[in-house]
Image: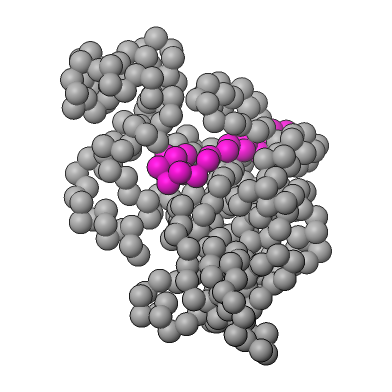
Amino acid sequence: MSEALTGLVLKGIGGFYYVQCGDTLYSCRARGKFRKDRISPYAGDRVRFTVDENGEGYLSEILPRKNFLVRPPLANLDKLFIVSSVSDPQPSTLIIDKTIAAAELKGIEPVLVFTKTDLDDAAPLREIYGMIGIRCYFVSAVDGVGVESLRPELTGCVSAFTGNSGVGKSTLLNALMPELVLETGEISRKLGRGRHTTRHVELYPVEGGYVADTPGFSTMDIDRYELFRKEELPDGFREFAPYIGACRFTSCSHTCEKGCAVLEAAEAGKISRSRLESYIAMYNEVKDIKEWQLSKSKNV
Ligand SMILES: Nc1nc2c(ncn2[C@@H]2O[C@H](COP(=O)(O)OP(=O)(O)OP(=O)(O)O)[C@@H](O)[C@H]2O)c(=O)[nH]1
Ligand SMILES: [Zn+2]
């Protein structure tokens, strides 16, 4: 057995975990201990492992995660690219805002990408999202506009792309990482998204960082699996921050109260109406959720 090494799990498949350590990719089995603790290593996990004289690796420890998603199973994400098309399909600001909030509350940096700018006017989205302090990119794969400007965002970090089916995620990833197409092939990529294939997540090295290929990772997953506590919800809307604490009532929900600094800021045009509407809709969805429902959903 070697001394314990530390590496990054790129994928787990068929009971094996592929762990990058320096320039070497080790295939490792998890020890029984993980099954007993009901912890599965995820792509993105930093792990300790040993290698025996036959070159076979054994995972011994998952290092503490800074964040994780359960569906798709991914750990230690630095950035989440939230991809929506300006048209075809029409974007939903509520879904975008839910996804932003989920990322913010997990400590993952959200980055917005609006695709298909060749199809429609992006100005309304630019107006809403240009003022919230999150970086936004407007791209078109058809005429190539904006695609290259995204590349520096990938540098040196672990990131994933999410967005509903058809918004152009694969097209964008293929444009940014042609080598990925060479490796996996357009057809196998498409097959990998089929209903009957086991979904597995894989990290691909790119620009000195890693991008997760997450077949079928749609913003629906956020809607279905991410429940918020109403108290933490304002933290999902970073442009509210200067006003939180300035409301007349300390228990202000920022949905209807008199003397609410957030509502006043929206009235004055400092917070976008669309974002406030999303916040209120989300608040109404979660306000009656009980603590036990939250803990159940967070441990699936
Ligand atoms: N007009 C236009 N069409 C685009 C653009 N980007 C992608 N498309 C088209 O939109 C369709 C969907 O693109 P995909 O890249 O497969 O979308 P996806 O988000 O990966 O979809 P799933 O694989 O279902 O998750 C394809 O027909 C693309 O050719 C764009 O910038 N402009
Ligand atoms: Zn308030």
Q: Is residue 296 visible?
A: yes
Query: Which quadrant of the structure image shows residue 214?
Result: bottom right
Picture layout, residue 44 above or below residue 49: above
Viewer-closest of 191 and 14:
14
Residue plotted at (68% across, 60% down): 204
Farthest residue to the bottom: give it: 54
Q: Quadrant of the N terminus?
A: bottom right
The image shows residue 5 at horizontal and vertical percentages of 60, 71
The image shows residue 8 at horizontal and vertical percentages of 60, 64
Q: Report the label total.
A: 0
Q: Is residue 40 left or right of residue 29?
A: left
Picture layout, residue 174 above or below residue 87: below
Viewer-closest of 25 and 267:
25
Q: Is residue 66 left or right of residue 10?
A: left
Residue plotted at (61% across, 22% down): 123
Q: Please report the bounds of the magenta region as a residue range.
A: 99-118
Q: Quadrant of the C terminus?
A: bottom left
Viewer-closest of 133 and 142:
133
The image shows residue 101 at horizontal and vertical percentages of 42, 39
